[in-house]
Image (tube, helix red, strand yellow):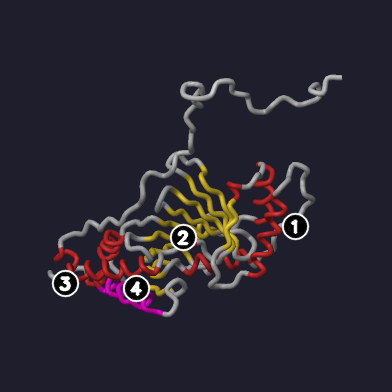
Amino acid sequence: MNPLRDIRPFPVPVVAALGPGGMVEDETLDYIAMPQGMAMYQPPILPEPEDIAACEGAVRVLQEVLDALQQVVHGGAPQRDTARVSLAGLTSADVTLINQVLGEGEVSAQVLAADGPPTLQIQESVFAGVWRVLGSSPEGYPVDYIEVGAVPEALREAAGMDGASAVPEALPIPPQVMNVPSVLVELEDQRRVWRAGDLAHVVNLTLLPLTPEDIAYLDYRLGTGRVLILSRGYGNCRITNCCVPNTWRVVYYNSMDTVILNSVEVTDMPDVACAAPEDLGDSAERVAEVLKWVRKA
């Protein structure tokens, strides 16, 4: 009887020659391309000071935005507090000037209606934490205002309503689903203990051995809410809320739209969607500089 007969083949080829020149170099590792560019603050291109000074309504709104920024920055909870500045009564020239001064920042968002079309369109300005909100209210009235804060309150409200809605009924786990049930248990446990002010609990799906069927079952059990946020600060980050409380899908893409990080966060709002307190402070200084420049006219 040959004792070596039933031994399985050695999984790694044995190298006979060692030392310099004795090893054959492997092919170069092919890593996923990471984001190369990062969005930076670009000062808005402003018209002449006398042209701005002629738009008294726009100057008044900018002063209210500055006051709101200072109120939020020096308030007790800059990550939760917000303040709104109405654009009612402005002339078309005032609105055009406001749009030019605010510009477009790195974060945009939508709140969808139950049947799909967006009811709110939200765009962060070049001043982090200063948001332009357009759309219609649940009663059908037009909405157009500037909101100052880490993130517009409408996004938190819509996500909270979705989280309180009925979740899909749990179907029998398909045979192809292997590892996601334990992820669902972990998320449910974290939702039960999470409280406002706690750090986000992040489950990195990219590092887990999940099949496409696992991801599909996870999406079904969590559901997809009405809030969609896109952050372009470093690469692209797509954020959607789930139909369970305080749960978000956060997916990062590189410049070729390849997924580089797929995660689920248990929190009231992912940090990547929010303006940090120091960003709000910087925005207050920059808006003050714009107003100072205007008043020289």
First along the sequence among labels 2 and 3: 2
The residue beneath circle 4 is 69
First along the sequence among labels 1 and 2: 1
Q: Give the residues drawn in magenta, as a range.
A: 60-75
**x, y percent for residue 243:** 63, 60
Q: Quadrant of residue 88?
A: bottom left
**x, y percent for residue 26:** 51, 27
Mark in the foreground, 1 or 2: 2
Is label 1 in a helix, a strand or a loop? loop
Quadrant housing the N terminus: top right
First along the sequence among labels 1 and 4: 4
First along the sequence among labels 3 and 1: 1
- Tell me if label 2 and label 4 are in contact, CB under 8 Å: no
- Going by the numbered disc 1, the residue's amino acid type is Glu
Gap between marks 3 and 1 measured at Cα: 61 Å
Number of labels in the image equals 4
First along the sequence among labels 3 and 4: 4
The residue beneath circle 3 is 295
- Tell me if label 1 and label 4 are in contact, CB under 8 Å: no
Residue at x 31%, y 58% (from the top left corner): 103
Mark in the foreground, 1 or 4: 4
Give the main secondary structure, helix, strand or loop, of the magenta stretch: helix
- Going by the numbered disc 4, the residue's amino acid type is Leu
The answer to if 73 sits in the magenta stretch is yes
Q: Quadrant of residue 185?
A: bottom right
Dot 2 crowding, Cα within 10 Å, few <14, some 14–19, many 20+: many
- Which label number is shown at residue 273? 2
